[in-house]
Amino acid sequence: MAPLPVAPAPYPKSHPFAWFPLAGQRHAIDRRDRNMPVGSPMRCLCGVTHPRGADGDMEWLWPTCERCWDEACRIVGVRRRG
């Protein structure tokens, strides 16, 4: 039996941003900044800058910043939720 064809992804797997827990929310930051040391300013797609804190297991469950989400959707060319 031949393998099923794989459909191409609707957008690239790699984007210029990454999701990161900052100041009680998941914000989108410039992908190049994701390895900055704790305390470094992290500029978010929503236009706000927060200092990087120590990340753990639960911070990834924080709510997503709506303004970052809207800007991320604009960048990848998808309609925002809602």
Image: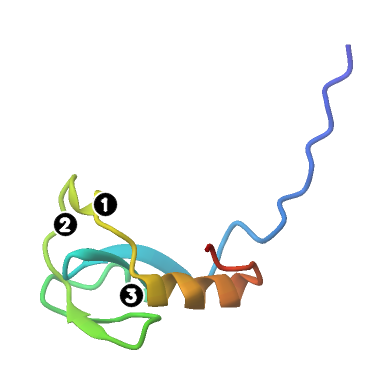
Position of residue 56 measured from the top left corner of the image (x, y, whole percent): 15, 50
User: Mark 2 = which residue?
Assistant: 55
Name the foreground residue: 71 vs 33: 71
User: Mark 1 = which residue?
Assistant: 60
Packing grade of label 3 (10 A; few <14, some 14-19, many >=20) is some
Tag 3: amino acid: Asp
Observer able to see residue 74? yes
Residue at 52% in and 63% down: 82
Residue 80 falls in image quadrant: bottom right
Marks 3/2: CA–CA distance: 14 Å
Tell me the tag on residue 33.
3
Give the vertical position of 57 relative to 37 (above or below).
Answer: above
Marks 2/1: CA–CA distance: 8 Å
Tag 2: amino acid: Asp
Q: Residue furthest front?
A: 82
- What is the secondary structure assignment of the residue under circle 1? helix
